[in-house]
Every structure is written in structure tokens, then in C-alpha cells.
Image (spheres, rainbow, N blue to C red):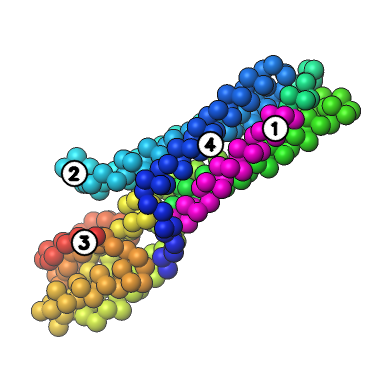
Amino acid sequence: MPHDHGQAHIDPKSGDRRVSIAIWANGLLTVAQIVGGLLSGSLALIADALHNFSDMASLVIAFGARKISRRPADARMTFGYGRIEIVAALINYTTLILIGFYLIYEGGMRMIDPPEVQGWTVVILGGVALVIDTLTALLTYSMQKGSVNIRALFLHNLSDALASVAVIIGGSLIILYDMRWVDPAITIGIALYILYLAFTEIGGPIRTLMLGSPPNIDGSAVVEAMRNIDGVSDVHHVHLWQMQEHEAALDCHVVLAAEGWGRIERIKTAIKDRLKDDFGIGHSSLEFEHEDRVHENADLFGHGTSDQTEKNHVHGDADGSR
């Protein structure tokens, strides 16, 4: 069944303004944490700064994608511009993975010989980070239901707030007990969490770019629903993919029984209505075949045949609707 995205009632300009504020807040925080980390000798602060920088990059991607994705389809981009966000997200997650491994390496080296760390600088900047991360999470909270991307940003900032709490605790332990090994240990912890987020989320963009079927739609259920339409004998050569974040698409060959051949238009309408109402598939292209002139040994999914031999078939309607 289709996923209920529950669009938030926020106009585009207001949403853009909120994302813009979050970008500036995370940008200033990143600079402050890097400077503070270098001055205090805290790798944990720099690790948190890189995490915040990755979130800022995600916010910039989201902001740009929100703008570009509103452009209508044209002769060069007939499906529109929505997938730019997917490409950018893949780049962002790949960068996160590289940063995560680098921080684990640096943290490991510092665990062997922990440097001196100025605990008060760590605690103060950690507190500032906690405030800004909480603010950013609040700014994106009411927008998350309408966008998977914004929801990811919200969860990232919420996790950043927790990471900032860990940095504050680490700085406090350094002040109280001179436990310098805590700083690289927290760095490694943040790096592992970054890797966890990146590896668990990178599959979505890869699946979409590979034209994978939407994860929330059961392809077998879609096929069964079409086969149950009166007049439909069979279905094959099914392609089901995620066109954009909220748009699933399908094309397939529909085999009609002899008695249904004279009412192709009604059957086509019935199929499209079923796809839209039951699965949220608003874009479908259907090619009709008479059961007496059907492809032999056609694969259910994809566009191949078991023995590469086909009978002549009649091309019916290949109509797409949004």
C-alpha cells in the first residue's frame, strides 16, 4: 500500500526560509567548533564540527533541490528535475562514510598518545552546539511529514544534539579528572554513529537511481490487482520504479481476453484507477496484447523472454497519465 506522506501545511517560501536559517546556524556552528577544536586540541569537537558540516551540506542540498525540483518538465528533462536531490544525497552519504573512517583513524592514533585538551572550551562550544542543533531540529520538525529528505535532516539534527551532549560530558570529565583519553574515545563513537547513519540511509538513493521498485509498494500485489480486472487475461513485462520522491511509475504489457478487446478504453481506465487508488501509482503506461497474439514465455518483470522467441503482437495504447 502507498505510504502516507502527510504533507505539512507550510508554503514553499516559508519552508525555504526555515531551511535557510538552519543552514546559516549550522554553518556558523561548524566554523566555531573547528576553530575551538584546533585551539583546545579537542578532536571530538572537530568530529562534531564535521558532522554538523555534513548536516549543513544536506541542508544546502535540500534547499537547492526544493528550488530546482519545482521547475516543470521540459524537452531535456521529461521526468522533471526531482532526482537532483537523490544524486546529491548519494554524494553526501559517500562523503560521510569517508569522514567517518578518517575520524576513526585519527581517534585511534590519539588513543595511543592522548594530547592535552582544554576542557572548558569543549564544554562551552558543546553547549552552543546543543542549542543550535535543538533549534534546527525545531525548525524542520513541522516540515518532516511532507518530505523524506527533510525528515532525514530532522533526525540528523536530533542525533547531533545527542552527540553534543556526549561532547559536553567528555569535556567535563577532562576538567574534573584529566581523562584525556575520553576525547578520542568520543570521537570514535561519533564516527561510528556517522557511519551507521550513512550506511543505513545510502541504500535509498542507490535503489532509486538503480530504478528499483518503491520499497513501500508490493510488486506482486500490483500484478495481482491488474490481473483481477475484468477482461484482463494476464500481465507481463512489468516495470515498477520510483520516478521521484513521491511519484511511483509503472509500465507493462496487459494481455486482454478476446471478449475484452472491444473495450480497451474501459479496461485501461479501470487499471489506472486501481493503480492510483490502491497503490498511489499516478503515472502508468500500458501496452495491450490480444491473447491470441501474445508474447510467448514473456518474463513477468523486466523486458525479456525465456527463449527470446515472440509471436507477433498488436500494440494497443501506450498512454501515460500523471
What x and y, as percent, mark residue 207? Answer: 42, 48
Q: Earlier in the sequence, mark 4 or mark 1?
A: 4
Callout 2 touching callout 1 (CB < 8 Å): no
Q: CA distance from mark 3 to mark 4?
A: 37 Å
Q: Earlier in the sequence, mark 2 or mark 1?
A: 2
Task: Tell me which amino acid carries mark 1.
Answer: Gly
Tell me if residue 83 can be seen: no
What x and y, as percent, mark residue 195? Answer: 60, 38
Q: Is residue 216 magenta?
A: no
Task: Tell me which amino acid carries mark 4.
Answer: Asp
Magenta stretch, residue numbers: 123-146
Q: CA distance from mark 1 to mark 3?
A: 52 Å
Mark toward the viewer: 2 or 4: 4
Residue on which the image places disc 4: 55
Mark toward the viewer: 1 or 3: 1
Q: Residue 321: which disc? A: 3
